[in-house]
Image (tube, helix red, strand yellow):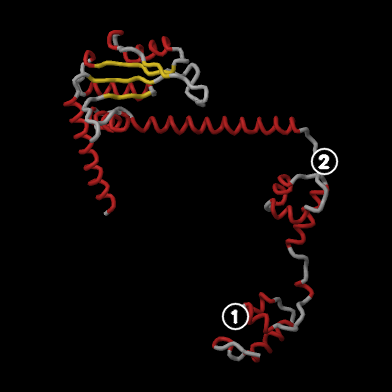
Amino acid sequence: MTHATGKYADFEGLRERAVALRREGLSRRQIRDRLHVDNNDILHRLLEGEPAPEWTKLPRARDDLRAKARELRLQGMTYDQIQVELGCSKSSISLRVRDLPKPERKRTTAQASEIARRGWEATMQRRDAERALTKKGAAAEIGPLSPRELFLVGVGLYWAEGSKSKAYRQQERATFVNSDPDMISVYLAWLRLLGVQPEHLRFHVHIHETADVPAAERYWADLTGAQASAFGKTSLKRHSPKTNRKNTGEGYQGCLVVRVLKSADLYRRIEGWWCGIVGAAKCTDQGNRT
């Protein structure tokens, strides 16, 4: 037999002590702690051929768990119910009771579906309440906007949603398109901050032909407060039956196009403002990294 070296060099002497402790009725754990044997392979070799004392041969916890799981299954409990009762995983339960017959279904499929539906509705109501509370708290964090804050918000809003001049298509004019009335409201407030007069604005509604076009035109006119003369001809989009559109119903008002007349200079300033924001953000970010 090859003996260990170093800490366990005196293997035979260590074995004599281990056997003596075993015959006194100590468990493997107690012998390990007493002799400071951390290697399970060495411990096994030290105790090889020595039977374990009777008191260590109590039923293992997993055997007890198996008996309880089978008893509950025979009482008609489902895996979910047994899991709650015993606090173990359903995969562990399955290993122990899968040979037993399934409990008789106590509800019809329709009844089970109805119970699941009610449970899901309660979950969705709770999530909606949590969502509303989070949004309300976040909105309160903003408070009033200073003119500079509105200015910066407007620049970012335009550069995200407004039209931009391209190298292959030079088009320096301020045009903003969106279907979100709140976005339109913030954008118009920004234009007023910049001193853009109402007579320099033109509006166009873009909407699917299957929608209530007159109602949408009235909606955008009320939102902007603009005169009818400021609205150009509405653009109608053809509706294809193959298109699975989600933006339908009473809440669908199409998109509103907001153009600023003679806005080449304004567009160039917007582009410059955005470059300034990008440069300032990079400097701030660099400071945060160091």
> Which of these two is toward me, 100 or 87?
100
Q: Is residue 207 left or right of residue 68?
A: left
Q: Which mark is residue 36?
A: 1
Element on which disc 1 rests: loop
> Which of these two is toward me, 93 or 25?
93
Element on which disc 2 rests: loop
Residue 52 horizontal/vertical position (percent): 76, 77
> Which of these two is toward me, 164 or 54?
164
In three-dimensional space, the C-alpha distance between marks 1 and 2, rounded to whole angstroms, equals 55 Å
Tag nearer the camera, 1 or 2 = 2
Q: In the rendered structure, which amino acid carries the disc numbered 1?
A: His
Q: In the rendered structure, which amino acid carries the disc numbered 2?
A: Glu
Number of marks present in the image shown: 2
Q: Residue at x 78, y 32 (%)?
A: 108
Quarter of image, res 275: top left
State whether residue 26 appears in this view. Answer: yes
Quarter of image, res 20: bottom right
Looking at the image, tell me whether mark 1 or mark 2 is earlier in sequence order.
Answer: 1
Q: Which mark is residue 104?
A: 2
